[in-house]
Amino acid sequence: MVKRNTCVFISGNGSNLKNLIFHSRDNIFPIKISLIISNNRKANGLIYAKKYKIPFILINTNFKNYENKILFNLRKYNIEFICLAGYMKILSNSLIQNFQKKIINIHPSLLPKFKGLNTFSRMLKNKEIKAGCTVHYVNEKLDAGNTIVQKTFFINKNDNEQILKKKTQKLEYRAFPEAIIKIFRNF
Ligand code: GAR
């Protein structure tokens, strides 16, 4: 199987990155993680880049031309596919247009509900019955591209933000690989 050269963008903990690295080591998983980009030099996820010897690039989004550095490296590593795994910055329209239908994101809510930040506190405040995660294509609007995979669970009355996060992430570790398999099955 030809594996697609993939870049994973992170900002923090990197547990989804770790999970994707784990899956990508399987011969029949359709992607190879060839590059990791972080906008946070202290991101815990960089541990996995080092441990598994995957090239990584740090970007400083305070610099005006930081997207040029991203595009340069995406080309340098022949990147064909991008996974946003806890990347907490918005990509520019030009980057999205360069990778039409080739960028996916994982979001900790049942989109279109609770786009943006602080999803769990807003869910609890809203007395939601269900929570979950969504893997979706990235387009020019925030958390608004077509859904690829969505997974749901029922919220218990004792669930707080930490518990919701834990339950959601457990589902994310299934949803992200499933979405990638689904995308490349149709190629
Ligand atoms: C994940 O739960 C992901 O859904 C969320 O950040 C977390 C990153 O965790 N993403 C967003 O909120 C994007 N708007 P990780 O660094 O352990 O993978």
Image (cartoon, rainbow, N blue to C red):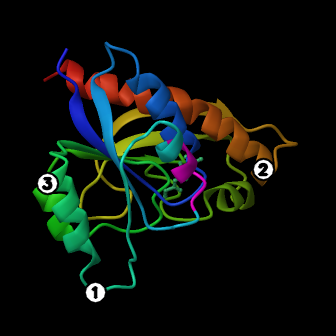
Magenta residues? 43-48
User: Which quarter shows the N terminus?
Assistant: top left
Q: Which residue is mark 1?
A: 64
The residue under the point 21% across, 31% down is 4
The answer to whether 102 appears left or right of 156 in the picture is left
Residue 84 image point, x, y percent: 39, 50
* Above or below for 110 versus 27: below
Going by the image, does 159 lie left or right of 64?
right
Which residue corresponds to the image point at 17% horizontal and 42% vertical from the top-left?
80
Q: Would residue 187 appear left or right of 13 to someone viewing this image?
A: left
Which residue bears the numbered disc 2? 162
Label 3, residues with CA under 10 Å away: few <14, some 14-19, many ≥20: few
x, y (%) of residue 16? Answer: 52, 40
Is the Cβ of the residue at disc 3 closer than 8 Å to that at disc 1?
no
Does 35 appear in magenta? Answer: no
Q: Nearer the viewer, residue 156 or 52?
A: 52
Task: Name the amino acid, label 1.
Answer: Lys
Marks 3 and 1, the one that precedes in the sequence:
1
- Spot occupied by residue 177 in the image (x, y as percentages of width and height): 42, 27
Q: Closer to us: mark 3 or mark 1?
A: 3
- Name the kind of residue labelled 2 in the image: Gln
